[in-house]
Image (tube, rainbow, N blue to C red):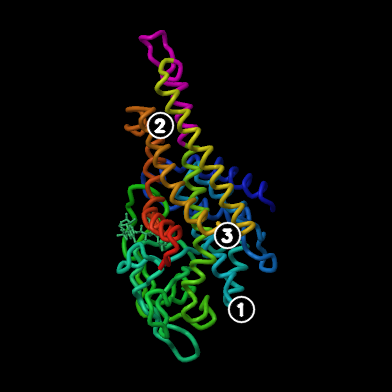
Amino acid sequence: MNVESAASAASAIARTVLAPSAADGDKQGRFSTEAVEELGRAGLLGLMLPVDVGGSLLGPRAFAGVVAALAEVDASVAMVFLMHTLASVTIAAAPRTAALEEVLRAMAGGRHLSTLAFSETGSRSHFWAPISRAESLDGGGARLSARKSFVTSAGHAQSYVTSALSHTGSGLTDSTLYLVLAGSEGVTVAGAWDGLGLRANASSPMVLERCVVPADRRLTAEGGGFQTMLDVVLPLFNVGQAAVSLGLCRAAVAATIAHLKSARFEHLGSTSLGEALPTLRAQLATMQIETDGLLARLDDAIGHLEQPGELTMLRVLEVKAAAGETAIAVTSLAMRACGGAAFSRHTGIERFFRDAHAGAVMAPTNDVLREFIGRALLGLPLF
Ligand SMILES: Cc1cc2nc3c(=O)[nH]c(=O)nc-3n(C[C@H](O)[C@H](O)[C@H](O)COP(=O)(O)OP(=O)(O)OC[C@H]3O[C@@H](n4cnc5c(N)ncnc54)[C@H](O)[C@@H]3O)c2cc1C
C-alpha cells in the first residue's frame, strides 16, 4: 500500500459502502459496523502500524488522504477511522509486550477497532488533565475508575486507549496511558449518543469502575502520558481533523454545484439557479477558494510533520483551528446558496453543516488552540 492506493481504497469504500447509508445512518444515529469491516478488509486499520505486525507503516499524508476521502461522504466514519488510527499509533509507540503485539496484529488484520478515551466529565475539554487517578496494583498493574465524557466508537471498539493521573505524580498533567479491552470488568457505556452532528459515530460517555489493567497493557512510563499526548497524538489529531474539514468542504462544494445546476426557475425560461443568479456563483466561488486554501494549509502542515522544523508545532496548532472555521464557513455558505432546499434537508448539505460544527469543539478546541498559539507567539508556557 502507498499514499495513492490508500486514498483510492478509501474512496472506493466511501462510494460503495458509505454513500448508500450515510444519510440514514445520520438520521438514525447508527454506527456503521459494515464500514469498519470494509476498512479492516482493505488493510486501512493498520495504515500507520509497523510492518512487523502486518501494518503498512504509512505516514500523515496517507492518513490525511484516507480521512478526507471518507469525510467527503460520511464524516462520522472518518472520525471513527481517525480515532482508531490515533489509538493504533499510541499503542505502537509503547514498549512492546506480547499483549500489545497481539492487539496490533489484530488491528493490522482488520479485526480490532480502537479509540481514544481521554476527555473526562470533570476536566471537560482539558483532556490533558484527567481527574481520575490510577491505583497501583502489585505486579505493576493498575485499577482505574473514571468518567469519560465522550468516547467515539463507544461500545463498538474492541479497546480504549485511556488516560488517568499517575499514582506517583502530583501535577495536573502527570498522567499515564493504558489500553483497556472492551468487555473487561467495570467497563460500561454510560448513555446514548444523540449529537447535533457526527451522529453516526457513537460518541457516548463511558464509565470505568475499578477496572483492572495488567502491567503489560500500560502504554507509557508512569507519568509519561502527557508527553505521548503531545508528541504522538496531538499532531496527527490536528492534521486528521483538518482532513475531516477538507472532506466536508469538498462535499459542500459538490452538493452546491449539483443543486445550482439542477434547480430551476420555470417562470424565467427554466434557467438553473446557477445560470440565473450571480450572487450564488460568487458564493460558490468563495467556497471553492476557501476549500483550496484549506488544502494548501493541510499540505503545508503535513510537510511540517514529514520534515519537522522550528515552526512545526505552530503550524500543527494552526491547522485544526483554521480548518474548523473554514468548514463552518463553507458549509454555512452552502446552506445559504442552496436556500430552503438545503434547510429542509433535500440536498444533504445540512448534514455537512452540522458535522462541520463538531471540529471546533473537539479538544483541543479551536478556542484553546488560539490560546496556545497566542502563548507560543508571546513566548509564554502553554501549560
Ligand atoms: C462528536 C464528538 C466526539 C468526541 N470524541 C471523543 C473521543 O473519542 N475521545 C475523547 O477523549 N474525547 C472526545 N470528544 C470530547 C472532545 O474532545 C471535548 O472534550 C468536548 O467536546 C468538550 O466539550 P465540553 O462541553 O466539555 O467543553 P468545555 O470544556 O466545557 O468548553 C466550553 C467552551 O469553553 C472553551 N474553552 C475551554 N477551555 C478554554 C481555554 N482554556 N481557553 C479558551 N476557551 C476555552 C471551549 O472552546 C468551548 O467553547 C468528542 C466530542 C465530540 C463533540
Q: Earlier in the sequence, mark 3 or mark 2?
A: 3
What's the magenta region? 252-275
- The residue lying furthest to the bottom in this view is 138
Q: Which residue is mark 2?
A: 347
Pinpoint residue 114: horizontal percent, then vertical percent.
Answer: 50, 64
Magenta-colored stretch includes residue 348: no
CA separation in Å, label 1 and label 3: 37 Å
- The quarter of the picture showing ligand 1: bottom left
Secondary structure type for disc 3: loop
**Dominant SS in magenta:** helix
Does ligand 1 reach within 8 Å of label 3's beta carbon?
no
Pinpoint residue 136: horizontal percent, then vertical percent.
Answer: 42, 87
Q: How many C-alpha atoms fall within 10 Å of the one at disc 3: few (<14), some, or many (≥20)? A: few
Secondary structure type for disc 2: loop
CA separation in Å, label 3 and label 2: 44 Å
Q: How many C-alpha atoms fall within 10 Å of the one at disc 2: few (<14), some, or many (≥20)? A: some
Q: Which residue is mark 3?
A: 310
Which residue shows up at 50% across the image and 58% down it? Answer: 237
CA separation in Å, label 1 and label 2: 50 Å
Q: Which residue is mark 1?
A: 98
Image-quadrant location for residue 363 = bottom left
Which residue shows up at 38% across the image and 58% down it? Answer: 371
